[in-house]
Image (cartoon, helix red, strand yellow):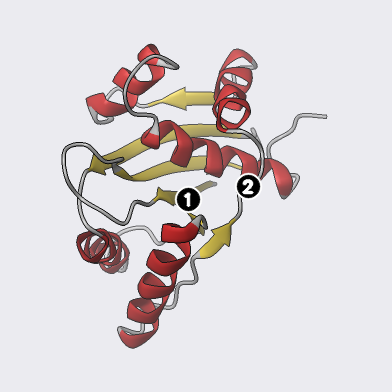
Amino acid sequence: DWMLVAALDPTIKGGKHNDKAAWVEAYFHRRRKELVFSFCNAEQRPAAQTVEYVVGRLRKSATTKRYDGLWCEANAAGTLIADAIEQRIQAEGLNYHIIQVDNSAPKDERIAILSDYAGRGQLFVADSIDPEFVKEWQGWPGYRWDDVLDAASTIVLQLKAAGLLDLV
């Protein structure tokens, strides 16, 4: 009954003064409308390394559990990276499609939705998740990075937009 979904908050440049490229995965239970964030990876890396990382995760899923939904933030860099990932997916015959998302709401509103759903008892974070998720969650909004939270909010917003997450 669990669907595996993922989102990418991309960045085009690596380097210690830039944003992190954040890949977040979650399991979603349709009947119970619960979301468990199970995996994240956030690193400062150039676009080509981000593409390679994501395609590697997609390739690995072919032998484990396939993704049921894939999203990428489509800001300027995101469009280029999503297109590059899509080209690699097709070239390798992975039978996935990454949906480009234009997050038009202000970032603080997007990230605040995570607390809303956690408060409703619909959003959980696995104990085994990378500590970066916890650092960003506990440090928001003062922590330097928010890339993992931004990717996580993309998942929540896309499930909400599809009418899959709200209880009413």
In the rendered image, which quarter contains the C terminus?
Answer: top right
Q: Where does residue 123 sit, x and y in percent of width and height? A: 54, 25
Secondary structure state at the residue bearing disc 1: strand
Residue 10 vs 31, above or below: the answer is below
Decide which of 145, 92 is in the foreground and name it. Answer: 145
Q: Residue furthest left?
A: 16
Residue name at image x 47 percent, y 50 percent: 5
Q: Can residue 37 be seen here? A: yes
Q: Where does residue 97 sit, x and y in percent of width and height? A: 49, 71
Horizontal arrangement in the rendering, residue 10 relative to residue 43 (left or right) = right
Checking the image for residue 5, the label placed there is 1
Q: Where does residue 94 sit, x and y in percent of width and height? A: 36, 77
Residue name at image x 38 percent, y 36 percent: 147
Q: Label 2, on which residue?
A: 158
Secondary structure state at the residue bearing disc 2: helix
Decide which of 150, 160 is in the foreground and name it. Answer: 150
Residue name at image x 47 percent, y 65 percent: 79
Q: Are marks 2 and 1 in contact (CB under 8 Å)?
A: yes
Q: Where does residue 114 sit, x and y in percent of width and height? A: 55, 25
Residue 80 vs 73, above or below: the answer is below
Q: Quadrant of residue 38?
A: top left
Q: Residues within 10 Å of mark 1 (few under 14, many from 20)?
A: many
Decide which of 98, 82 is in the foreground and name it. Answer: 82
Q: CA distance from mark 2 to mark 1?
A: 10 Å
Horizontal arrangement in the rendering, residue 11 relative to residue 53 (left or right) = right
Residue name at image x 38 percent, y 81 percent: 87
Q: Residues within 10 Å of mark 2 (few under 14, many from 20)?
A: some
Q: Residue furthest front?
A: 17
